[in-house]
Amino acid sequence: MKERTRGYIWKTGLIAALLPLAAGSATQDSVPSSGTVARTASMAANLPPALPLPPTNSNLDIMRFEAIAEALVANGRIPGLAMAIVKDGRILSARGYGITDTRAPQPVDAHTVFRLASLSKSFAGTMTGILVNDGMLRWDSHLTDYVPSFRMSMPDAAQQITVADILSHRMGLTHNAFDRDLEGNANYHDLTLRMANAPMTCAPGDCYAYQNVAFSLIGDIVFATTGQFYSEAVARRIFKPLGMNDASYGLEGIEASARWARPHVRGRGGWVSLTPKPTYYRVAPAAGVNASISDMAQWLLAHTGHRPEVLPAPLLATLHAPLVTTPSEIRGASWRRSRLTTAGYALGWRAYNYSGHQVVFHGGAVQGYRGAMALLPEQDLGVVILWNSESGLPGGLLPTILDNALGMSGGQWLDDETIDGSEGVLYAERNATPSGTSASASKASPP
Protein backbone atom coordinates (compact mmCIF):
# COMPACT_ATOMS: atom_id res chain seq x y z
CA MET A 1 0.00 0.00 0.00
CA LYS A 2 1.41 3.35 -1.03
CA GLU A 3 0.36 6.57 0.58
CA ARG A 4 2.15 9.90 0.87
CA THR A 5 2.15 11.12 4.43
CA ARG A 6 2.56 14.50 6.06
CA GLY A 7 3.55 14.43 9.70
CA TYR A 8 3.33 10.61 9.95
CA ILE A 9 6.00 8.07 9.00
CA TRP A 10 4.78 4.70 7.76
CA LYS A 11 7.55 2.08 7.78
CA THR A 12 8.38 -1.40 9.02
CA GLY A 13 9.02 -2.54 12.57
CA LEU A 14 5.83 -1.44 14.36
CA ILE A 15 5.58 -3.85 17.20
CA ALA A 16 9.29 -3.82 17.93
CA ALA A 17 8.98 -0.06 18.49
CA LEU A 18 5.69 -0.23 20.37
CA LEU A 19 6.53 -3.00 22.82
CA PRO A 20 8.96 -1.00 24.94
CA LEU A 21 6.22 1.65 25.29
CA ALA A 22 3.60 -0.78 26.61
CA ALA A 23 4.27 0.27 30.18
CA GLY A 24 7.20 -1.68 31.18
CA SER A 25 6.83 -5.41 31.74
CA ALA A 26 9.98 -7.45 31.26
CA THR A 27 7.94 -9.85 29.16
CA GLN A 28 7.18 -7.15 26.62
CA ASP A 29 10.66 -5.71 26.55
CA SER A 30 12.16 -9.03 25.54
CA VAL A 31 9.99 -9.52 22.44
CA PRO A 32 11.99 -9.78 19.20
CA SER A 33 10.82 -8.16 16.00
CA SER A 34 10.00 -10.96 13.59
CA GLY A 35 7.35 -12.40 11.26
CA THR A 36 4.14 -10.40 11.21
CA VAL A 37 5.61 -7.98 13.70
CA ALA A 38 8.10 -6.66 11.18
CA ARG A 39 5.53 -5.94 8.48
CA THR A 40 3.73 -2.97 10.03
CA ALA A 41 4.44 0.67 10.69
CA SER A 42 5.19 2.53 13.90
CA MET A 43 4.52 6.11 14.85
CA ALA A 44 5.40 5.73 18.52
CA ALA A 45 9.00 6.74 18.04
CA ASN A 46 7.85 9.94 16.34
CA LEU A 47 5.51 11.17 19.07
CA PRO A 48 6.47 14.59 20.40
CA PRO A 49 7.98 14.74 23.89
CA ALA A 50 5.62 15.36 26.77
CA LEU A 51 5.20 19.05 27.58
CA PRO A 52 4.00 20.72 30.79
CA LEU A 53 0.23 21.13 30.82
CA PRO A 54 -0.76 24.64 29.72
CA PRO A 55 -3.56 26.52 31.46
CA THR A 56 -7.03 25.83 30.10
CA ASN A 57 -7.54 27.75 26.85
CA SER A 58 -9.96 30.58 27.62
CA ASN A 59 -10.71 30.86 23.90
CA LEU A 60 -12.46 27.47 23.85
CA ASP A 61 -16.04 28.60 23.35
CA ILE A 62 -18.01 26.14 25.46
CA MET A 63 -21.14 28.31 25.50
CA ARG A 64 -21.18 28.37 21.71
CA PHE A 65 -20.87 24.59 21.45
CA GLU A 66 -23.66 24.08 23.95
CA ALA A 67 -25.81 26.54 22.01
CA ILE A 68 -25.18 24.55 18.85
CA ALA A 69 -26.21 21.35 20.64
CA GLU A 70 -29.40 23.06 21.79
CA ALA A 71 -30.11 24.21 18.23
CA LEU A 72 -29.62 20.68 16.91
CA VAL A 73 -32.38 19.27 19.12
CA ALA A 74 -34.69 22.27 18.76
CA ASN A 75 -38.03 21.64 17.04
CA GLY A 76 -37.39 17.92 16.77
CA ARG A 77 -34.52 18.20 14.28
CA ILE A 78 -33.04 15.27 16.17
CA PRO A 79 -34.56 13.67 19.28
CA GLY A 80 -31.65 13.81 21.69
CA LEU A 81 -27.92 14.39 22.02
CA ALA A 82 -25.25 14.37 24.71
CA MET A 83 -21.83 16.03 24.59
CA ALA A 84 -18.76 16.07 26.82
CA ILE A 85 -15.70 18.29 26.51
CA VAL A 86 -12.66 17.84 28.74
CA LYS A 87 -9.48 19.90 28.80
CA ASP A 88 -6.38 19.98 30.99
CA GLY A 89 -7.82 17.27 33.19
CA ARG A 90 -11.10 19.09 33.81
CA ILE A 91 -14.64 18.43 32.60
CA LEU A 92 -15.73 21.68 30.95
CA SER A 93 -19.10 20.37 29.83
CA ALA A 94 -21.02 17.09 30.18
CA ARG A 95 -24.67 17.63 29.36
CA GLY A 96 -27.66 16.17 27.62
CA TYR A 97 -30.00 17.90 25.17
CA GLY A 98 -33.41 16.97 23.84
CA ILE A 99 -35.33 13.84 24.70
CA THR A 100 -34.80 10.12 25.17
CA ASP A 101 -37.86 8.90 23.29
CA THR A 102 -40.39 10.64 21.04
CA ARG A 103 -43.15 8.33 22.29
CA ALA A 104 -42.52 8.80 26.02
CA PRO A 105 -40.23 11.84 26.19
CA GLN A 106 -37.91 12.45 29.09
CA PRO A 107 -34.98 14.89 29.07
CA VAL A 108 -31.57 13.57 28.15
CA ASP A 109 -29.24 14.30 31.06
CA ALA A 110 -25.64 13.56 31.97
CA HIS A 111 -26.56 10.03 33.11
CA THR A 112 -28.78 9.03 30.17
CA VAL A 113 -27.24 5.93 28.61
CA PHE A 114 -26.58 5.70 24.86
CA ARG A 115 -25.44 2.79 22.74
CA LEU A 116 -21.84 3.47 21.69
CA ALA A 117 -21.66 1.21 18.62
CA SER A 118 -18.09 1.20 17.27
CA LEU A 119 -16.80 3.61 19.89
CA SER A 120 -16.71 0.30 21.79
CA LYS A 121 -13.59 -0.66 19.86
CA SER A 122 -11.52 1.78 21.89
CA PHE A 123 -12.45 -0.20 25.01
CA ALA A 124 -11.31 -3.43 23.36
CA GLY A 125 -7.91 -1.99 22.48
CA THR A 126 -7.55 -0.53 25.96
CA MET A 127 -8.59 -3.74 27.73
CA THR A 128 -6.02 -5.64 25.71
CA GLY A 129 -3.39 -3.02 26.46
CA ILE A 130 -4.01 -3.40 30.19
CA LEU A 131 -3.33 -7.13 29.88
CA VAL A 132 -0.17 -6.41 27.88
CA ASN A 133 0.86 -3.95 30.57
CA ASP A 134 0.27 -6.68 33.17
CA GLY A 135 2.53 -9.08 31.26
CA MET A 136 -0.34 -11.46 30.53
CA LEU A 137 -0.30 -10.83 26.76
CA ARG A 138 2.01 -9.42 24.11
CA TRP A 139 1.04 -7.34 21.12
CA ASP A 140 2.62 -10.03 18.93
CA SER A 141 0.91 -12.92 20.75
CA HIS A 142 -0.78 -15.16 18.18
CA LEU A 143 -4.52 -15.73 17.99
CA THR A 144 -4.16 -19.49 17.62
CA ASP A 145 -2.28 -19.71 20.92
CA TYR A 146 -5.63 -18.81 22.54
CA VAL A 147 -8.12 -20.04 19.92
CA PRO A 148 -6.30 -23.06 18.48
CA SER A 149 -9.26 -24.16 16.34
CA PHE A 150 -9.36 -20.92 14.32
CA ARG A 151 -8.72 -21.33 10.59
CA MET A 152 -8.49 -19.12 7.50
CA SER A 153 -8.53 -19.91 3.79
CA MET A 154 -4.92 -18.93 3.07
CA PRO A 155 -2.41 -21.60 4.20
CA ASP A 156 -0.86 -20.80 7.58
CA ALA A 157 -2.67 -17.44 7.73
CA ALA A 158 -4.46 -18.23 10.97
CA GLN A 159 -1.17 -18.96 12.70
CA GLN A 160 0.23 -15.58 11.62
CA ILE A 161 -2.51 -13.39 13.11
CA THR A 162 -1.38 -11.38 16.13
CA VAL A 163 -3.25 -9.47 18.81
CA ALA A 164 -2.18 -6.21 17.14
CA ASP A 165 -3.42 -7.44 13.74
CA ILE A 166 -6.91 -8.03 15.16
CA LEU A 167 -7.12 -4.64 16.87
CA SER A 168 -5.91 -2.74 13.80
CA HIS A 169 -8.09 -4.60 11.26
CA ARG A 170 -5.19 -6.30 9.49
CA MET A 171 -6.41 -9.90 9.37
CA GLY A 172 -6.44 -10.01 5.57
CA LEU A 173 -10.20 -10.42 5.16
CA THR A 174 -12.44 -8.34 2.92
CA HIS A 175 -14.06 -5.23 4.44
CA ASN A 176 -16.80 -5.89 7.03
CA ALA A 177 -16.65 -9.63 6.50
CA PHE A 178 -19.89 -11.36 7.60
CA ASP A 179 -21.57 -8.15 8.80
CA ARG A 180 -24.61 -8.88 6.63
CA ASP A 181 -24.86 -12.35 8.12
CA LEU A 182 -24.61 -10.86 11.61
CA GLU A 183 -27.41 -8.43 10.76
CA GLY A 184 -29.40 -11.47 9.62
CA ASN A 185 -29.14 -12.91 13.16
CA ALA A 186 -26.29 -15.32 12.48
CA ASN A 187 -24.43 -16.60 15.54
CA TYR A 188 -21.04 -15.04 16.24
CA HIS A 189 -19.35 -18.38 16.88
CA ASP A 190 -20.71 -19.83 13.63
CA LEU A 191 -19.37 -16.84 11.72
CA THR A 192 -15.87 -17.29 13.14
CA LEU A 193 -15.96 -20.89 11.91
CA ARG A 194 -16.99 -19.70 8.44
CA MET A 195 -13.84 -17.60 8.24
CA ALA A 196 -12.05 -20.83 7.34
CA ASN A 197 -13.51 -20.44 3.83
CA ALA A 198 -13.77 -16.66 3.59
CA PRO A 199 -11.91 -14.89 0.76
CA MET A 200 -8.75 -13.01 1.73
CA THR A 201 -7.26 -9.93 0.10
CA CYS A 202 -3.79 -10.23 1.62
CA ALA A 203 -1.74 -12.07 4.22
CA PRO A 204 -2.42 -11.09 7.84
CA GLY A 205 -0.65 -7.87 8.77
CA ASP A 206 -0.26 -6.69 5.16
CA CYS A 207 -3.41 -4.62 4.56
CA TYR A 208 -6.32 -2.90 6.27
CA ALA A 209 -9.99 -3.83 6.06
CA TYR A 210 -12.44 -2.75 8.77
CA GLN A 211 -14.07 -5.59 10.71
CA ASN A 212 -16.70 -6.21 13.38
CA VAL A 213 -16.97 -10.00 13.61
CA ALA A 214 -13.24 -10.67 13.18
CA PHE A 215 -12.33 -7.77 15.47
CA SER A 216 -14.34 -9.43 18.22
CA LEU A 217 -11.97 -12.39 18.32
CA ILE A 218 -10.08 -10.22 20.79
CA GLY A 219 -12.83 -11.08 23.26
CA ASP A 220 -11.97 -14.76 22.96
CA ILE A 221 -8.34 -13.92 23.70
CA VAL A 222 -9.29 -11.86 26.76
CA PHE A 223 -11.43 -14.75 28.04
CA ALA A 224 -8.66 -17.29 27.47
CA THR A 225 -6.16 -15.00 29.21
CA THR A 226 -8.21 -13.93 32.22
CA GLY A 227 -10.82 -16.65 32.67
CA GLN A 228 -13.46 -13.90 32.70
CA PHE A 229 -16.06 -13.13 30.09
CA TYR A 230 -14.93 -10.14 28.05
CA SER A 231 -17.64 -7.81 29.38
CA GLU A 232 -16.81 -8.77 32.97
CA ALA A 233 -13.12 -8.07 32.41
CA VAL A 234 -13.85 -4.60 30.99
CA ALA A 235 -16.20 -3.80 33.86
CA ARG A 236 -13.59 -4.83 36.43
CA ARG A 237 -10.53 -3.22 34.84
CA ILE A 238 -12.05 -0.13 33.16
CA PHE A 239 -15.61 0.79 34.15
CA LYS A 240 -15.21 0.38 37.90
CA PRO A 241 -11.78 2.03 38.43
CA LEU A 242 -12.70 4.97 36.17
CA GLY A 243 -16.03 5.54 37.89
CA MET A 244 -18.05 4.78 34.74
CA ASN A 245 -21.04 3.90 36.88
CA ASP A 246 -23.70 4.00 34.15
CA ALA A 247 -21.75 1.86 31.68
CA SER A 248 -22.77 -1.65 30.68
CA TYR A 249 -22.66 -4.19 27.88
CA GLY A 250 -25.42 -5.57 25.71
CA LEU A 251 -29.14 -5.18 25.20
CA GLU A 252 -29.89 -6.30 28.75
CA GLY A 253 -27.44 -3.72 30.04
CA ILE A 254 -29.01 -0.75 28.29
CA GLU A 255 -32.56 -1.84 29.09
CA ALA A 256 -31.63 -2.16 32.78
CA SER A 257 -30.35 1.44 32.86
CA ALA A 258 -32.26 3.90 35.03
CA ARG A 259 -32.59 6.20 32.01
CA TRP A 260 -31.58 5.43 28.47
CA ALA A 261 -32.02 6.94 25.03
CA ARG A 262 -34.11 4.92 22.60
CA PRO A 263 -32.90 4.61 19.00
CA HIS A 264 -34.81 6.57 16.36
CA VAL A 265 -35.29 6.22 12.62
CA ARG A 266 -37.12 8.44 10.16
CA GLY A 267 -40.81 7.79 9.70
CA ARG A 268 -43.51 9.56 7.71
CA GLY A 269 -44.46 11.62 10.70
CA GLY A 270 -40.95 12.35 11.90
CA TRP A 271 -38.69 10.43 14.26
CA VAL A 272 -39.91 6.98 15.34
CA SER A 273 -38.39 5.24 18.37
CA LEU A 274 -37.55 1.54 18.24
CA THR A 275 -36.35 -1.28 20.43
CA PRO A 276 -32.56 -1.58 19.96
CA LYS A 277 -31.55 -4.33 17.55
CA PRO A 278 -29.55 -7.06 19.32
CA THR A 279 -27.38 -8.03 16.36
CA TYR A 280 -24.23 -5.98 16.91
CA TYR A 281 -24.45 -6.51 20.65
CA ARG A 282 -23.38 -10.08 19.80
CA VAL A 283 -19.93 -8.78 18.93
CA ALA A 284 -19.25 -7.06 22.24
CA PRO A 285 -15.65 -5.95 21.63
CA ALA A 286 -16.67 -4.30 18.35
CA ALA A 287 -19.97 -2.71 19.33
CA GLY A 288 -21.23 -3.77 22.75
CA VAL A 289 -20.74 -0.83 25.15
CA ASN A 290 -23.51 1.37 26.54
CA ALA A 291 -22.53 4.52 28.44
CA SER A 292 -23.71 7.93 29.56
CA ILE A 293 -21.99 11.18 28.72
CA SER A 294 -20.83 11.32 32.35
CA ASP A 295 -19.10 7.98 31.76
CA MET A 296 -17.58 9.18 28.52
CA ALA A 297 -16.17 12.29 30.18
CA GLN A 298 -14.23 9.93 32.46
CA TRP A 299 -13.13 7.91 29.43
CA LEU A 300 -11.78 11.07 27.80
CA LEU A 301 -9.94 12.08 30.97
CA ALA A 302 -8.30 8.66 31.12
CA HIS A 303 -7.25 8.77 27.46
CA THR A 304 -5.87 12.30 27.79
CA GLY A 305 -3.51 10.99 30.46
CA HIS A 306 -5.25 12.05 33.67
CA ARG A 307 -5.83 8.58 35.13
CA PRO A 308 -2.29 7.12 34.98
CA GLU A 309 -3.02 4.64 37.76
CA VAL A 310 -5.46 2.96 35.34
CA LEU A 311 -3.95 3.88 31.95
CA PRO A 312 -0.28 4.90 32.16
CA ALA A 313 1.10 7.33 29.60
CA PRO A 314 3.34 4.82 27.75
CA LEU A 315 0.35 2.55 27.23
CA LEU A 316 -1.71 5.44 25.86
CA ALA A 317 1.07 6.30 23.41
CA THR A 318 0.99 2.72 22.16
CA LEU A 319 -2.80 2.57 21.84
CA HIS A 320 -2.98 5.84 19.88
CA ALA A 321 -0.08 5.23 17.47
CA PRO A 322 -1.21 4.37 13.90
CA LEU A 323 -0.26 0.96 12.58
CA VAL A 324 -1.66 0.99 9.06
CA THR A 325 -2.78 3.65 6.59
CA THR A 326 -6.51 4.13 5.90
CA PRO A 327 -6.62 6.62 3.01
CA SER A 328 -10.36 6.18 2.46
CA GLU A 329 -10.91 8.08 5.74
CA ILE A 330 -9.71 11.27 4.04
CA ARG A 331 -12.74 11.15 1.75
CA GLY A 332 -16.37 11.67 2.66
CA ALA A 333 -17.54 14.56 4.83
CA SER A 334 -16.35 18.03 3.87
CA TRP A 335 -14.29 18.44 7.06
CA ARG A 336 -12.39 15.25 6.24
CA ARG A 337 -11.60 16.40 2.72
CA SER A 338 -10.52 19.82 3.94
CA ARG A 339 -8.69 19.00 7.16
CA LEU A 340 -7.26 15.46 6.99
CA THR A 341 -3.91 14.97 5.28
CA THR A 342 -3.24 11.41 6.45
CA ALA A 343 -5.28 8.79 8.28
CA GLY A 344 -4.46 5.49 9.93
CA TYR A 345 -5.75 2.91 12.36
CA ALA A 346 -4.12 2.24 15.72
CA LEU A 347 -5.28 -0.24 18.40
CA GLY A 348 -9.03 0.32 18.60
CA TRP A 349 -8.62 4.01 17.65
CA ARG A 350 -8.18 5.94 14.43
CA ALA A 351 -5.26 8.36 14.06
CA TYR A 352 -5.50 11.46 11.88
CA ASN A 353 -3.27 14.29 10.76
CA TYR A 354 -5.73 17.17 11.09
CA SER A 355 -4.10 20.01 9.16
CA GLY A 356 -0.78 19.23 10.82
CA HIS A 357 -2.17 18.31 14.24
CA GLN A 358 -2.46 14.83 15.74
CA VAL A 359 -6.07 13.79 16.35
CA VAL A 360 -7.09 10.42 17.79
CA PHE A 361 -10.64 9.56 16.77
CA HIS A 362 -13.40 6.99 16.48
CA GLY A 363 -16.94 7.10 15.17
CA GLY A 364 -19.81 4.70 15.61
CA ALA A 365 -23.18 3.91 14.04
CA VAL A 366 -25.85 1.25 14.48
CA GLN A 367 -29.57 1.45 13.82
CA GLY A 368 -30.88 4.54 15.56
CA TYR A 369 -27.63 5.66 17.21
CA ARG A 370 -24.59 7.68 16.14
CA GLY A 371 -21.50 8.92 17.95
CA ALA A 372 -18.04 10.41 17.51
CA MET A 373 -15.13 11.13 19.84
CA ALA A 374 -11.74 12.74 19.40
CA LEU A 375 -8.61 13.53 21.37
CA LEU A 376 -6.37 16.48 20.54
CA PRO A 377 -3.20 15.65 22.50
CA GLU A 378 -1.34 18.93 21.94
CA GLN A 379 -4.27 20.80 23.50
CA ASP A 380 -4.99 18.15 26.17
CA LEU A 381 -8.53 18.18 24.80
CA GLY A 382 -11.14 15.44 24.46
CA VAL A 383 -14.61 15.62 22.90
CA VAL A 384 -17.41 13.06 22.56
CA ILE A 385 -20.85 13.50 21.04
CA LEU A 386 -23.61 10.87 21.16
CA TRP A 387 -27.09 11.05 19.64
CA ASN A 388 -30.07 8.72 19.44
CA SER A 389 -31.02 8.97 15.78
CA GLU A 390 -29.69 8.19 12.34
CA SER A 391 -29.35 11.87 11.47
CA GLY A 392 -26.04 13.08 10.10
CA LEU A 393 -26.87 16.59 11.31
CA PRO A 394 -24.58 16.66 14.40
CA GLY A 395 -21.60 15.28 12.48
CA GLY A 396 -20.05 18.70 11.93
CA LEU A 397 -20.05 19.68 15.60
CA LEU A 398 -16.89 17.77 16.49
CA PRO A 399 -14.66 19.34 13.79
CA THR A 400 -16.18 22.72 14.70
CA ILE A 401 -14.85 22.23 18.23
CA LEU A 402 -11.46 21.07 16.97
CA ASP A 403 -11.16 24.10 14.71
CA ASN A 404 -11.96 26.42 17.59
CA ALA A 405 -9.40 24.74 19.84
CA LEU A 406 -6.74 25.08 17.15
CA GLY A 407 -7.63 28.64 16.18
CA MET A 408 -8.52 27.55 12.65
CA SER A 409 -11.03 29.39 10.47
CA GLY A 410 -12.63 28.92 7.09
CA GLY A 411 -14.72 25.85 7.79
CA GLN A 412 -18.46 25.63 8.37
CA TRP A 413 -19.02 21.94 9.01
CA LEU A 414 -22.62 22.20 10.22
CA ASP A 415 -25.27 22.33 7.53
CA ASP A 416 -27.13 25.55 8.22
CA GLU A 417 -29.53 24.91 5.36
CA THR A 418 -30.56 21.60 6.88
CA ILE A 419 -31.01 23.40 10.18
CA ASP A 420 -33.71 25.57 8.62
CA GLY A 421 -31.81 28.79 8.43
CA SER A 422 -30.46 28.77 11.99
CA GLU A 423 -27.06 29.99 10.92
CA GLY A 424 -27.13 32.81 13.46
CA VAL A 425 -27.53 30.28 16.26
CA LEU A 426 -25.06 27.77 14.92
CA TYR A 427 -22.14 29.99 14.02
CA ALA A 428 -22.47 33.25 15.91
CA GLU A 429 -21.46 33.77 19.50
CA ARG A 430 -24.48 34.17 21.74
CA ASN A 431 -25.58 33.92 25.32
CA ALA A 432 -26.84 30.52 26.44
CA THR A 433 -27.43 28.42 29.51
CA PRO A 434 -24.29 28.72 31.69
CA SER A 435 -21.68 26.42 30.21
CA GLY A 436 -20.90 23.06 31.75
CA THR A 437 -24.18 22.71 33.63
CA SER A 438 -26.21 19.53 33.77
CA ALA A 439 -29.24 18.98 31.60
CA SER A 440 -31.21 17.40 34.42
CA ALA A 441 -33.62 20.34 34.37
CA SER A 442 -34.03 20.49 30.60
CA LYS A 443 -37.57 20.43 29.22
CA ALA A 444 -38.94 17.30 27.58
CA SER A 445 -41.54 17.68 24.89
CA PRO A 446 -42.44 15.77 21.74
CA PRO A 447 -41.04 17.12 18.46
Image: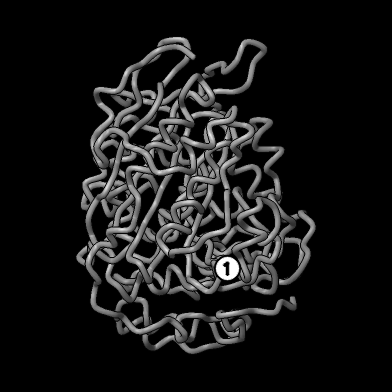
Q: Residue at x 27, y 54 (%)?
A: 237
The percent position of residue 215, horizontal first and vertical second, equals 56, 55
Above or below 266: residue 155: below
- Badge 1 marks a residue whose secondary structure is helix
The residue closer to the viewer here, 334 or 101, is: 334
Seen in the image, is 81 located left or right of residue 199?
left
Q: Amino acid at mark 1?
A: Asp
Above or below 370: residue 136: below
Seen in the image, is 224 located left or right of residue 280?
left
Q: Is residue 389 visible?
A: yes
The percent position of residue 331, horizontal first and vertical second, equals 70, 58
The residue closer to the viewer here, 130 or 114, is: 114
The percent position of residue 259, horizontal first and vertical second, equals 32, 23
Seen in the image, is 279 located left or right of residue 388?
right
Quarter of the image where the N terminus is located: bottom right
Residue 260 occupies which quadrant of the picture?
top left
Residue 52 occupies which quadrant of the picture?
bottom left
Q: Residue at x 41, y 10 (%)?
A: 104
The residue closer to the viewer here, 137 or 398, is: 398
Q: Residue at x 60, y 63 (%)?
A: 339
The percent position of residue 79, horizontal first and vertical second, equals 48, 23
Q: Residue at x 23, y 47 (%)?
A: 240
The residue closer to the viewer here, 339 or 410, is: 410
Which residue carries the number 1 mark? 165
Badge 1, how many Cα within 10 Å: few under 14, some, many 20+? many
Above or below 414: residue 311: below
Colouring style: one colour
